[in-house]
């Protein structure tokens, strides 16, 4: 059997980030990747703008998207926020998602302003809201697993 040929080695966990390091990391990160569960049990992953706000991760998207259909069926989600350059850093956030349809445009602008000018963020939020019913996804973490290769 193949398993007989593989050396059994326990993989060490890299040092985690402190709470302060995580907050700083979340504030600096460019994008998140949101994982939801498709109806057939496979995983749907999508890159998305986000904002860390008082213990929650906020994401702006459109209601007719697959990720929203998935959340309506099963609100357990996983969010990956990471870097792509060495030394790698990241966090896997396991949590539950709630959908917020109230006063969406200013909330979307606040999320988009992390990467766009205020004018660009407002234009983008209004343009998307004119095409689709928009929604804010509020993710409350249940567990966060972080890693920081710079500490290795």
Image (cartoon, rainbow, N blue to C red):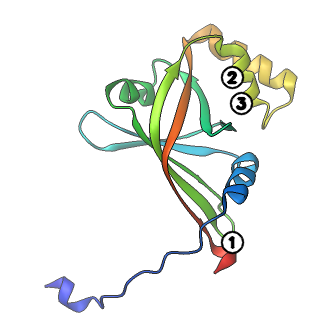
Alpha carbon separation for disc pair 3 and 2: 5 Å
Give the class, few, some or many, for how many residues have Cα within 10 Å of label 2's Cα (few <14, many ≥20).
many
Q: Secondary structure at mark 1?
A: loop
Q: Secondary structure at mark 3?
A: helix
In the image, which disc is placed on residue 86? 1
Q: Quadrant of residue 82?
A: bottom right
Q: From this view, report whether residue 9 is shown above or below residue 149.
A: below
In the image, which disc is placed on residue 111? 3
Task: Please give the name of the residue rendered at 65% of the width and 62% of the height, measured from the top-left corner.
Answer: 84
Q: Earlier in the sequence, mark 1 or mark 2?
A: 1
Say if mark 1 contacts mark 2, CB within 8 Å: no
Q: Secondary structure at mark 2?
A: helix
The residue at the far top in this view is 130
Q: Single out the mark in the foreground, 1 or 2.
A: 2
Q: Quadrant of residue 57?
A: top right
Q: Quadrant of the N terminus?
A: bottom left
In the image, which disc is placed on residue 108? 2
Residue 101 coordinates in the image, percent (x, y): 55, 13
Q: Quadrant of residue 52?
A: top right
Alpha carbon separation for disc pair 1 and 2: 31 Å
Residue 69 coordinates in the image, percent (x, y): 38, 24
Task: Please give the name of the residue rendered at 54% of the width and 11% of the height, measured from the top-left corner.
Answer: 133
- Compared across the picture, whether 99 is left or right of 70 comes to right
Say if mark 3 contacts mark 2, CB within 8 Å: yes
Q: Earlier in the sequence, mark 1 or mark 3?
A: 1
Alpha carbon separation for disc pair 1 and 3: 27 Å
Task: Please give the name of the residue rendered at 69% of the width and 21% of the height, measured from the top-left corner.
Answer: 107
Say if mark 1 contacts mark 3, CB within 8 Å: no
In the image, which disc is placed on residue 29? none
Give the class, few, some or many, for how many residues have Cα within 10 Å of label 1's Cα (few <14, many ≥20).
few
Task: Please give the name of the residue rendered at 19% of the width and 84% of the height, measured from the top-left corner.
Answer: 2
Q: From this view, report whether residue 142 is shown above or below residue 140.
A: below
């Amino acid at each position: 059997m193949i398993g007989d040929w593989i050396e059994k080695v326990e993989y060490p966990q890299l040092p985690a980030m402190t709470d302060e390091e995580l907050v700083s990391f979340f504030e600096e990160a460019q994008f998140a990747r949101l994982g939801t569960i498709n109806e057939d049990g496979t995983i749907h992953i999508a890159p998305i703008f986000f904002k860390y706000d008082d213990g929650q991760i906020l994401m702006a998207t459109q209601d007719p998207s697959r990720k929203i259909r998935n959340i309506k069926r099963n609100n357990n989600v996983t969010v990956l926020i990471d870097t792509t350059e060495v030394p790698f850093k990241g966090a896997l956030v396991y949590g539950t998602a709630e959908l917020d349809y109230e006063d969406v445009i200013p909330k979307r602008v606040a999320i988009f302003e992390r990467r766009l000018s205020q004018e660009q963020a407002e234009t983008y939020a209004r343009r998307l809201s004119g095409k689709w019913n928009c929604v804010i996804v509020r993710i409350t973490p249940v567990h966060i697993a972080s890693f920081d290769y710079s500490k290795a």
